């Protein structure tokens, strides 16, 4: 799913760079995807370690490199991509906001594919449910659970892509597309977390909110207010 996401990102960046009239060759687009891939993998891994299971990895340092056992955080991957694209923008002298707007259009595609991969692997499943579509996942406790991976694939993948595409075509303000992606993801992730099984080593804060929700709510707030500020600044000019 990562490979499919990176291939899709390459073609989206090529298409968007032509639309935005950015001087990106096919090699430049491939380099940008490589930067993004490193940001996703390294940021996602470091983010998971810091946000979700730091104690375990401090006790088992060799497990830091056991990525085949799972353990990736979207929030860490997001920060990793933002940093990687900033480095690339400085290197190529390309406006940073224009660059990350292209990545924002690619992000829902990768998110949707990633959640389908979670579903296929039977991981990151939902909380127990008596709904007719509840599923018993291999290796679980045998209790029917929400297929929350599919909820996320629909909201974070299909719906978020349509929202970001609409904003990217409707707004001429650089950075607003990225803000829409950040706010949309934060909102959808916050909602789906009510149906997703919390991480066993963390549980719920205040008996209600998961770690994912505590990390996603600021994304929604910051993304929304940043979009408003960027738009106001643009109109004031």
Image: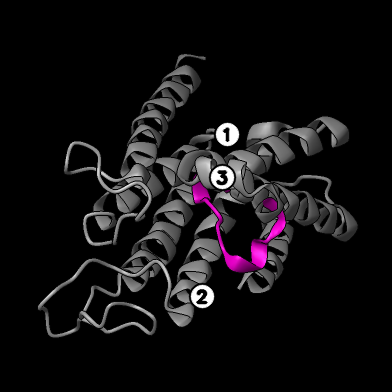
Disc 1 residue crowd, few under 14, some 14–19, many 20+, Cα 10 Å: many
Q: Is residue 37 visible?
A: yes
Helix, strand or loop at mark 2: helix
Determine whether, in the image, residue 24 is placed left or right of residue 187.
Answer: right
Q: Work out which residue is located at the far left of the displayed protein and give it.
A: 130
* Front residue of this view, candidates 88 and 197: 197
Q: Earlier in the sequence, mark 2 or mark 1?
A: 2
* Image marks 3 and 1: residues in contact by CB distance under 8 Å: no
- Residue at mark 3: 49
Coordinates of residue 138 in the picture (x, y in percent): 38, 85
Helix, strand or loop at mark 3: helix
Boundaries of the magenta span: 64-77
- Classified by dominant secondary structure, the portion drawn in magenta counts as helix
Placement of 232 over or under 80, stated as above or below: above
Q: Which mark is residue 174?
A: 1
Helix, strand or loop at mark 1: loop
Q: Is residue 101 visible?
A: no
- Residue at mark 2: 117
Q: How much space separates mark 3 and mark 1, taking CA atoms?
A: 33 Å
Q: How much space separates mark 2 and mark 1, taking CA atoms?
A: 32 Å
């Amino acid at each position: 799913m990562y490979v499919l996401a990176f291939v899709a990102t390459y073609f989206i960046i090529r298409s968007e760079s032509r639309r935005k009239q950015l001087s990106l060759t096919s090699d430049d687009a491939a380099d940008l995807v490589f930067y993004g891939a490193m940001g996703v993998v390294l940021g996602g891994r470091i983010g998971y370690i810091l946000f979700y299971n730091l104690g375990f990895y401090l006790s088992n340092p060799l497990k830091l490199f056991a990525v085949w056992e799972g353990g990736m955080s979207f929030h860490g991957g997001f920060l990793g991509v933002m940093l990687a694209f900033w480095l690339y923008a400085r290197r190529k002298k390309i406006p940073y906001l224009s660059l990350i707007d292209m990545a924002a259009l690619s992000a829902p595609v990768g998110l949707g594919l990633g959640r389908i991969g979670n579903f296929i692997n039977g991981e990151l499943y939902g909380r127990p449910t008596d709904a007719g579509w509840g599923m018993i996942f291999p290796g679980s406790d045998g209790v029917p659970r929400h297929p929350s991976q599919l909820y996320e694939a629909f909201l974070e993948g299909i719906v978020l892509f349509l929202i970001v595409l609409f904003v990217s075509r409707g707004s001429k303000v650089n950075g607003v597309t990225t803000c829409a992606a950040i706010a949309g993801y934060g909102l959808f992730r916050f909602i789906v977390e009510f149906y997703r099984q919390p991480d066993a080593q963390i549980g719920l804060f205040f008996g209600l909110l998961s770690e994912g929700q505590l990390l996603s709510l600021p994304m929604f707030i910051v993304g929304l207010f940043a979009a408003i500020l960027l738009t106001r600044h643009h109109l004031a000019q």
